[in-house]
Amino acid sequence: MVDRDQAARILEKYGQEHILNYFDELGSEEKQELLDQIGIIDFSVLENLDAEKNSRSARGKFEPLGAVTISDIASNKEVYERAGIEAIKAGKTAAVMLAGGQGTRLGFDKPKGMFNMGVEKELYIFQCLINNLMDVVKAAGTFVPLYIMTSEKNHKDTTEFFKEKNYFGYDPAYIRFFVQDMAPSVDFNGKVFMESRSKISVSPNGNGGWFSSLVRAGLLDEIKEKGVEWINVFAVDNVLQRIADPGFIGAVIKSGKQSGGKVVSKASPDEKVGVLCLEDGMPSIVEYYEMTEEMRTLLDENGELAYKYGVILNYLFNVKKLEEICDNKMPVHVVDKKIPYMSEGGEFIKPSEPNGHKFETLVLDMVHMQDNCLAYEVVREKEFAPVKNAEGVDSVESARELLKANGVKI
Ligand code: UTP
């Protein structure tokens, strides 16, 4: 709890005095709400606007990292799958769905998972994912605990939707929801946006905080009591996502590695996808915009791209290691987004182009905190159909085509 003077001091430190511009005109409840928000928000993320202080600007030395390839996996299919199914049957695996994003590129005003991929029938994104997970449930003969991360902005809609749809046939006793943290967003001059005269505009702080939010929600105790050792973290927006994939889980367990990441071979050197590689000898993901021309086009001894394996936001982490790194400070990414805000004249504006920055931590940075990571190559057309945009690349249209190609009735 902070009072007006304390709030003013905090804001002055970060050059955000405008937040109190309308304070004197507010009712007492609104005043309190605003002060509470100022007290809770971690304004230190704004320091990341300063390139020199940006926690992610300094990178180490990159080297390529090989993968268990599609053909390796085909040769070891039975061994991997048996090991994975055993782990699932023994209750050692859980899954975490990252569904706290705002999906601004898609421009759908409900949680992305509520988007209907169906054409002749209803088939929601959440439903696609549950259907995929049900394949594993059937094969293992047991439900996999599923933790769904939402944000303050979409929690109510998400939980009500699952309830209304009867959890798409999943056993609700195995589903838990938890809410991620929020961060302020700023215009291109670094000034925090207001949503109204008494409300600072905040947005979900990226998917990197999933484990700390899960711990804060008190769910780690439950996870440990259940004997869960492995957590499969995945994005909500890949409708072909294989969740708790026994082959993947088995391969990571058999490899003796601490973590795993599903990857696809890059379609071309310029494909805009993060690549799983080594950074200073440790596993890491280099973003496409961080790669030099030389890295992008470098060939290995077989004449293939050396930095070839793009990540698809499907990782397997070990619970013990997650506990160890839980308090590590995650690097903060400054990203450009469309952020609705209240203009100086008091008008609420929904921009059609990016108008400011959000601050996000990303799950991919957790990979660099692992001692090692197994890159597990999957067939792109079978496992990767992201719904990011309304049209064009990685869109509703392209994902629908891929669903059909995989025999899913839409
Ligand atoms: P994206 O990076 O695509 O972000 O998220 P987004 O917010 O969904 O979409 P855009 O960029 O605004 O269009 C990748 C995954 O991480 C989750 C998303 O729900 C998606 O599954 N995510 C993203 C969170 O859970 N929380 C966040 O704060 C951001």
Image (cartoon, rainbow, N blue to C red):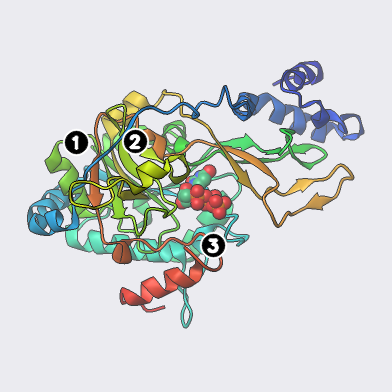
Q: Secondary structure at mark 2?
A: strand
* Residue at the disc numbered 1: 257
Q: Quadrant of residue 292?
A: top left
The earlier-in-sequence mark between 1 and 2 is 1
Is the residue marked 3 within 8 Å of ligand 1, measured from its CB?
yes
Name the side, left or right, on which 119 lies relative to 257.
right
The residue at 75%/46% (across/down) is 341
Pick the quarter of the image with the N terminus: top right
Q: Secondary structure at mark 3?
A: loop
Spatial separation of the CA atoms under disc 1 and disc 3: 35 Å
Amino acid carrying label 3: it is Asn
Q: Is residue 140 above or below residue 401?
A: above
* Residue at the disc numbered 2: 284
Q: Which mark is residue 188?
A: none
Q: Is residue 2 above or below residue 387?
A: above
Q: Secondary structure at mark 1?
A: loop
The residue at 16%/47% (across/down) is 251
The residue at 60%/55% (across/down) is 104
Pick the quarter of the image with the C terminus: bottom left
The earlier-in-sequence mark between 1 and 3 is 1
* Residue at the disc numbered 3: 389
Amino acid carrying label 2: it is Ser
Kindly indicate whether the residue at mark 3 contacts the one at mark 1 (C-beta within 8 angstroms).
Answer: no
Of the two numbered discs 1 and 2 in the rendering, the one whose residue sits closer to the viewer? 2
